[in-house]
Amino acid sequence: MKKIFITGFTGQVGSQLAEFLHDETDVDIVGFMRWQEPLENISEMVNKINNKDRIFIEYGDLTDQGSLLSSLSKWMPDIIFHLGAQSYPKTSFDIPIETLQTNIIGTANLLESVRRLKNESYDPTIHVCSSSEVYGKSSSELALTEDTPLHGSSPYSISKIGTDFLGRYYAEAYSLKTFITRMGTHSGKRRSDVFFESTLAKQIALIEAGYQSPQIKLGNLESVRTFQDVRDAIRAYWLLAKGVYSCDIPPGEVFNIAGTEKYQLTEIVDMMLEFSTRDDITIVTDANRLRAIDADYQMFDSTKIQKVIDWKPEIPVTEMLLDLLEYWRGQIENGKIPLNR
């Protein structure tokens, strides 16, 4: 194994996966990104990129198959981590067509490019990143397994159902070495503020710094879900990829990846407020933050993944949340004031 290709390179997960691979392996890492994307998440790698220290950038777009085909034929990566997506469920209600185009057509472009390049000497392992959102609005409080019926509850979840099916289809129809993951809520540093726990942490940091009145605006807090640190999720991605690459795991398999600590969102609010230096913060419901349909119960059965790799979440949720709050405090201290949204 020599080369790893990452779509969604500048995202929270993609950037931290690249850092993990650089520190823990000897592979070369190729990040696929649009030329105009913000570079903040990869700022700690810029010097390595400039000096070609095992991290390289390829410019392109998931919706432009030509750029994918060109990049893949140039590098012929051994493993492809397909993390690039329009990944914000709430935002997908506002931009449904872009969400479907990027996530479904973008995934098809990637897999079709690999199919065209695949031959006896080139047969890469492909991680197709789906989402726990594919389960949608659960009808029961039983733990969700990989066999639980899928239920689209947003344009985003529908797009990820399409992504999920494409990953399995290309394994069955064309023998591509894919594996599909459905990751539950994952957080930590660099988490976008469009997600519940990150906007909560960001607003606390803004209040502490005097940039926001002591009132936090949130959406639905009745949801129950598991949480896990993104670093634990990245370890699972890497172990699964190595398993498929070495043929220890058959292609086309689907895996839940989720934490074991379950919380109602009100409990997360209480925990985060305990970390704050302020004791006068109140919470209000903002109608603009409510979804038309919410995935209000997400508790997962991770039996399957634990049968094939030696993995379980190791980082406590309390540590994950404190790291997230410290991330936003650091952003503000460094003069990077986020939008109050």
Image: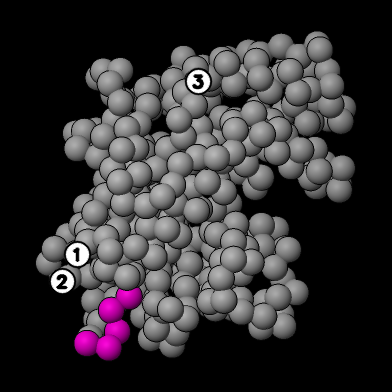
State the residue at coordinates (46%, 34%).
259
Q: Position of residue 170 (x, y in %)?
A: 19, 65
- Residue 95: x %, y % from top left: 42, 44
**Do tag 3 and tag 2 residues touch (Cβ < 8 Å)?**
no
In contact (CB < 8 Å): disc 1 and disc 2: yes
Element class at badge 2: helix
What residue sits right under mark 2 in the picture?
174
Up/down of 111 relative to 317, above or below: below
Residue 303: percent from left, percent from top: 31, 38
The amino acid type, in three-letter code, at marker 3 is Tyr
Verify whether residue 289 appears in magenta.
Answer: no
Q: Which residue is mark 3?
A: 263
Residue 176 in the figure: left or right of residue 60:
left
Q: Earlier in the sequence, mark 3 or mark 2?
A: 2
Within 10 Å of disc 2 (Cα), the crowding (few <14, some 14-19, many 20+) is: few
- Whether residue 235 sits left or right of residue 12 in the image: it is left
- At horizontal 25% and vertical 19% (from top left) the residue drawn is 139
- Pointer 3 or 1: first along the chain: 1
Amino acid carrying mark 2 in the image: Tyr
Residue at horizontal 50 percent and vertical 32 percent from the top: 227
| Residue linked to disc 1 | 171
Residues in magenta, as a range: 120-124
Q: CA distance from mark 3 to mark 1?
A: 36 Å
